[in-house]
Image: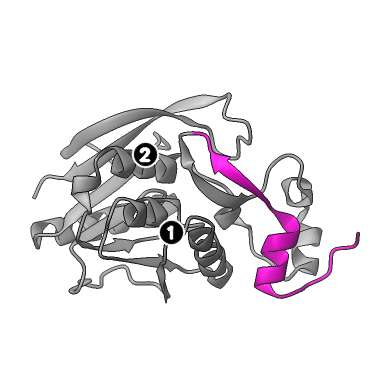
Amino acid sequence: MSWVSTSPLQLIERETVVSRAPLCPEIQLHLVTHTCRLWRATDRDLEALELADPFWAFAWAGGQAIARYLLDHPEEVRGRKVFDFAAGGGIQGIAAALAGASCVAANDLDPIALHAASMNADLNGVHLDLAGGDLVGDPLAEFEVVLAGDAFYGSEAPAVLKWLCRLAKAGKRVLLADAGRGFIETEGLLGLAQFETPTDEDSDGTRLRPTWVYTPNP
């Protein structure tokens, strides 16, 4: 089969398989595994698909950790309005909805990620509102809980953390995760839980890394 650009929904259905995240087997997701062509796709292949790196197609360590935490502690989100920042495929937002959140908005810069999050929500019988664009710095006035599972990469990571800390000082419950990638300083954050999560892009869950769930001290 050749690499041909198609609609986001068709692409997700064609190039992923429905799987369960190792740390959160309650949740089904459209994922790229080692059986999928996208697992081995080159930059040229992605260009033919008019596709950026499909980060939405993996259950990353931080998202799995926050999702597991919410499923184990539904009181964190039950009856509350939740904002899932840098949602990717939406695993943590789906967990919030399953845990009883009154509404969940999934935000991502990649429009295909929002399609994937919506499709994944459908798989699990929940609904996610979709919010595109760069909302770093936004006060998120209508939300009570903010989730940031895999949001800390590169030089922009400290600015994202400062924004989340400001939201916490404004009274929002902020839950963030760090898998020890070294992009943020976690000193001063309050640790809530630690999980052994599959490493990035590990399709079978056999290689684990410690991942922490934190909240900023208000």
Query: Is residue 131 within the magenta segment?
Result: no
Q: Measured from the top left, where is residue 123 in percent x and y?
A: 54, 57
Look at the picture and state if 152 lies above or below 166.
above
**In the image, which disc is placed on residue 48?**
none
Task: Give the labeled residue for mark 2.
Answer: 68
Q: In x, y percent, where is residue 163?
A: 23, 61
Element carrying mark 2: helix
Residue 81 at what x, y percent from top left? 23, 65
Residue 4 in the magenta stretch? The answer is yes
Mark 1 lies on residue: 87
Instruction: Look at the image and name its color scheme.
Output: one colour
Badge 2 or badge 1: first in the primary sequence: 2
Q: Amino acid at mark 1?
A: Ala
Residue at the extreme front of the image, as rendered: 125
The residue lying at 30 percent from left, 63 percent from top is 83
Which of the pair 37/97 is nearer the observer? 97
Q: Quadrant of residue 139?
A: bottom left
Instruction: Tell me the SS state at disc 1.
Output: loop
Discs 2, 1 touching: Cβ within 8 Å: no
Q: Residue furthest right?
A: 1
Magenta extent: 1-22
Residue drawn at the location 55% of the way across and 64% of the way down = 119
Image quadrant in which the N terminus is located: bottom right
- Image position, residue 70 (x, y; %): 30, 44
